[in-house]
Amino acid sequence: MKFINYFKEFFYPSTRTYFYDKPVQLIDRKIHSILEESQYTPFWAINNDFKGSFEDAETFYIKTISRGYMRNQIQYSVKLIAKIAEVSKDKTSVETKAMTSIEYYFIFFPGIIIGTISCINFFRTGIKADLYWSIGIALGGIILSFCLSNPAKVSIYEIYEWHIDGNLTSV
């Protein structure tokens, strides 16, 4: 994958569309029951890896749960937003988009800012160490934010496919 594609996916995530040969009311009821079940699963249960709810009549979201973040102070989870739409009488589509968490942007932008400040310091003083630090910090912030957010996006799509898509195709 080209480096520019990582930028594109980081700032403008792609949309995945899932199609089901069932009426929209049936899909809507099934997703409601799956998301309600996820809200009341105890924290020690094995299948407790996501929480989700409806934002309006046709839009819902799911987020991953990490056992390491039980206090909910900082969550590095990606939010998957999905919209249910009726394609025809017996065909329904669900458009999904994994949105990058704000915490990954807090890694990305300070790396660039601190790297730029260090580069300016190199031009003022001529010390090569400042140049090396500026390159390292700027690239480190970018690469670290990409390396953390991309696996999180893959995992939220896997959770959707496992819990929701798997249940909808078996209905």
Image (cartoon, helix red, strand yellow):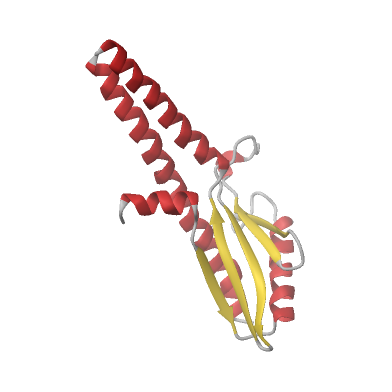
User: Residue most toward the front?
Assistant: 124
Picture coordinates of residue 118, whole percent (x, y): 35, 20
Q: Is residue 125 above or below residue 82?
A: above
The answer to which quarter of the image holds residue 22 is: bottom right
Task: Say left or right for 119 vs 111.
Answer: left
Name the quarter where the N terminus is drawn.
bottom left
- Along the viewing direction, whichever of 93 and 45 lies nearer the viewer: 93
Name the quarter where the C terminus is drawn.
bottom right
Q: Residue at x 52, y 34 (%)?
A: 106
Picture coordinates of residue 160, whole percent (x, y): 56, 64
Task: Say left or right for 116 vs 98.
Answer: left
- Along the viewing direction, whichever of 108 and 158 lies nearer the viewer: 108
The answer to which quarter of the image holds residue 62 is: bottom right
The answer to which quarter of the image holds residue 41 is: bottom right
Picture coordinates of residue 16, whole percent (x, y): 51, 68
Picture coordinates of residue 6, whole percent (x, y): 38, 51
User: Residue most toward the right?
Assistant: 57
Q: Is residue 149 above or below residue 138?
A: below
- Along the viewing direction, whichever of 33 and 107 lies nearer the viewer: 107
Task: Say left or right for 144 vs 36.
Answer: left
Q: Is residue 86 above or below residue 90?
A: above
Q: Residue at x 31, y 23 (%)?
A: 133
Q: Residue at x 47, y 29 (%)?
A: 110
